[in-house]
Amino acid sequence: MTAETDGGRPLWVFAYGSLMWDPGFAYVHCAPAVLKGYRRAFCVLSMAHRGTAERPGLVLGLAPGGTCRGVVYRVAPAHEADVQAYLFERERRRYDVYRERLLRVRHTRGAVLAQTYTADPDSPGYAGDLTEDEIARRIVAAHGERGPNFDYLERTLGQLETLGIHEPVLERIYALARALRGG
């Protein structure tokens, strides 16, 4: 469902991974937000942006269960169509695993329906629940069009820290990945 099929409500976009530190689109408001019913997980294979077909990287997706803290962006009405097209290119064209959804998120001004991308467990691009060690190994080994997979992890964790979001699983994965890199 897109904003156009949602009765003309303003377009809000919930970000939980690289969209937090690299949205790539104009917005008029950004606020910390919470999504219940989904958790942030390295469950999406990246064969372009952060890996290759021969050595897939891993990027974040929203997996069922738990709670995810991130940010929500409010898009100006004049830019909604451009943002929708941009997000389709970025999130859907290369990653058939993401499903665009309108989900209720809570932020400082209340609750809104926000466009976000959940991971489809039935997609071939869904990596499933891997061990933290396996995730770290894949992240250290992968490099794609947008750079090393390790940089994706590091920048995401840095943004979470800036937002005051403590993410123990990602912190453990980062520690394992750093050790594998020798630093």
Image (spheres, helix red, strand yellow):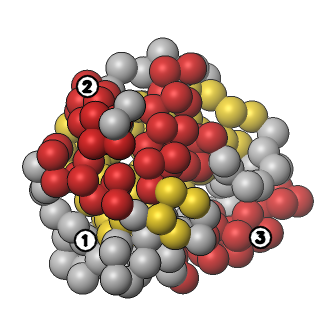
Labelled pair 2, 3 in contact (Cβ < 8 Å): no
- Helix, strand or loop at disc 1? loop
Q: Earlier in the sequence, mark 2 or mark 3?
A: 3
Quadrant hosting residue 89: bottom right
Residue type at tag 2? Pro
- In percent of width and height, residue 128 lies at 16, 63
Q: Earlier in the sequence, mark 3 or mark 1?
A: 3
| Nearer-the-camera pick, 140 or 61 | 140
Q: Nearer the viewer, mark 2 or mark 3?
A: 2
Labelled pair 3, 1 in contact (Cβ < 8 Å): no
Disc 2 from disc 1: Cα separation: 22 Å
- In percent of width and height, residue 7 lies at 61, 63
Q: Which residue is mark 3?
A: 81
How packed mark 2 is, by other alpha carbons closer than 10 Å (few <14, some 14-19, many 20 or more), is: few
At 24% from the left edge and 30% from the top edge, which residue is drawn? Answer: 172
Q: Earlier in the sequence, mark 2 or mark 1?
A: 1
> In the displayed structure, does residue 116 sit left or right of residue 126?
right
Q: Which residue is mark 2?
A: 168
Residue 174 in view in this figure: no
| Nearer-the-camera pick, 139 or 167 | 139
- The dot on residue 126 is 1
> In the displayed structure, does residue 112 sit left or right of residue 127?
right
- The dot on residue 115 is none
- Helix, strand or loop at disc 2? helix
Residue 178 in view in this figure: yes
- Helix, strand or loop at disc 3? helix
| Nearer-the-camera pick, 171 or 29 | 171
At 45% from the left edge and 56% from the top edge, which residue is drawn? Answer: 149
Residue type at tag 3? Ala
> In the displayed structure, does residue 68 sit left or right of residue 25?
left
